Image: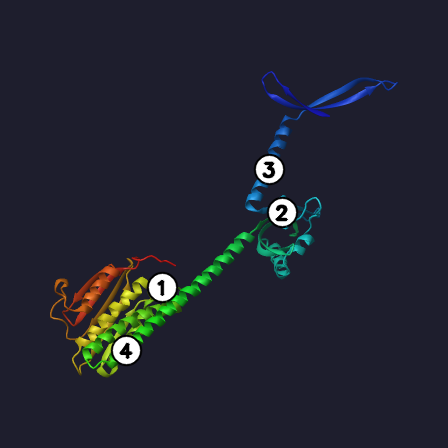
Amino acid sequence: LYDEDLLTKSGEILHVEWRAVPLYDRDGTLVENLCSGIDVTELRKKQAALAKSELRMKAVEELAQIGYWEIDKINKKVFWSEGDYKILELDPEETVPSADLFLSLVHPDDRDDAEKSMQHSIEQHVDWIATYRLCIGGKVKYVADWAHHFYNDDGTVSFTTGLMKDITEEVINKQNQEQLLQEKDALLRELNHRTKNNMQVISGMLNLRAGMENDLRVSEVFLEIDRKIQSMALAHEKLYKSADLSHVDFREYFKELVTLLKESYDTEKRGITIVTEIDNIGGLIDIAVPCGLILNELITNSLKYAFAPGKGGVIRIVLRKETSGIIVMTVSDTGAGMEAVPDDDKLDSLGIRTIHALGRRQLRGEVEWDVSRGVTCTIRFRDDIYSKRI
């Protein structure tokens, strides 16, 4: 039996498989050979294509770290591809594949769940998808498994095919990333916590210095600076207490800031009411701090200058986010008002200069005033002027 390539007149190569039968005479002497040839060209092509396909499959298994497996219930056979043996770290020459052998390699804590989920997929006639651990040579591997079932007419499984993928590297990388994020989260919270504490120390020193001053004007300057620092410290406190270390909840931040100012200026005894209408908006610390400083300045100005002694009034704070992404912050009062709209070229008030600088430079927004009835200051800015850095 041997193969031979023959060249036809048309230039085509035929693969021929020859079979020879020797003929002997009565003395045992070879007389002749009877030969027959079969054209196996198409068979060889199919065999070559199959070999190429197997090589491709092997390459895919190696690159993707997957293995193909079969369970033939009818013939009671189990097949594992080279990829499976590689994942399981077994020698195909010395191993007889079986379901029991495989289950013995599944982590004891995952074995019951894997078997139950497989049985559930069979009963529900759905594909099986599972992720579990393997214990191999004293170490743990993570694998993802997919399976499809073929059924007999009576509903029992006749054949199951599946793919198993080694996801150990992906799982470990994810665990490492989660650990790094947790550590980063803890460090950032500690940083904001310490920043807040440091600011409170400065605030306490300013407050103490203000109480030692005999000149009320100088004392008030110290207290104003103190309130600004408290405003920034509060923003950092909200940040380290929030679930999202990038954003400050404006509703909570503004309400607590208002509470601090109400206590400082004894609004209840003066008959002054502060009303807040704040949407559920979150903003980066880069936006929250200037907003808090502006709010502090506007409310302070209203409490100091808008209401005559013995006459109460209302201060209204409104924060809205428009569908266009523009945030609108409005602070208004029902007090005495101003003679004219503040002019940038003729500003003597440090407070209003501060509002303009923060609103136009840091928030890159627009600052508008209305003094027709009391004083209303409206600041419009976008919520995407700064990028998230963590």
The circle on residue 55 is 3
Left or right of residue 43, residue 363 in this image: left
The residue identified by callout 1 is: 247
Query: Picture quarter containing residue 139?
Result: bottom right
Rounded to the nearest angstrom, the CA distance separating label 1 from label 3 is: 53 Å
> What's under tag 2, amino acid-wise?
Lys
For marks 2 and 4, the one nearer the N-term is 2
Under mark 3, the amino acid is Leu
Contact check, label 1 and label 2, Cβ < 8 Å: no
Q: Is residue 373 above or below residue 53?
A: below
From where the camera sits, is residue 152 visible?
A: no
First in residue order: circle 1 vs circle 3:
3
Q: From the image, state whether disc 2 or disc 4 is nearer to you.
A: 4
Coordinates of residue 251 in the picture (x, y in percent)? 32, 69
Residue ID for mark 2: 86
> How many angstroms separate mark 4 from mark 1 (CA)?
29 Å
Mark 4 and mark 1 residues within 8 Å of each other at the beta carbon: no
Q: CA distance from mark 2 to mark 4?
A: 71 Å
Tell me the amino acid under the disc marked 4.
Answer: Asn
At 11% across and 70% down in the image, what residue appears? 339
SS class, disc 4? helix
Q: Foreground mark, 4 or 1?
A: 4
Density class for disc 2 (Cα within 10 Å; few <14, some 14-19, many ≥20) is some
Residue 330 on image: x %, y %: 23, 67
Can residue 31 be seen here? The reply is yes
What separation in Å lies between label 1 and label 2 (alpha carbons)? Answer: 47 Å
Q: Nearer the viewer, mark 4 or mark 3?
A: 4
**Depth check: 215 or 260 in front?**
215
Residue assigned mark 4: 207
Residue type highlighted by circle 1: His
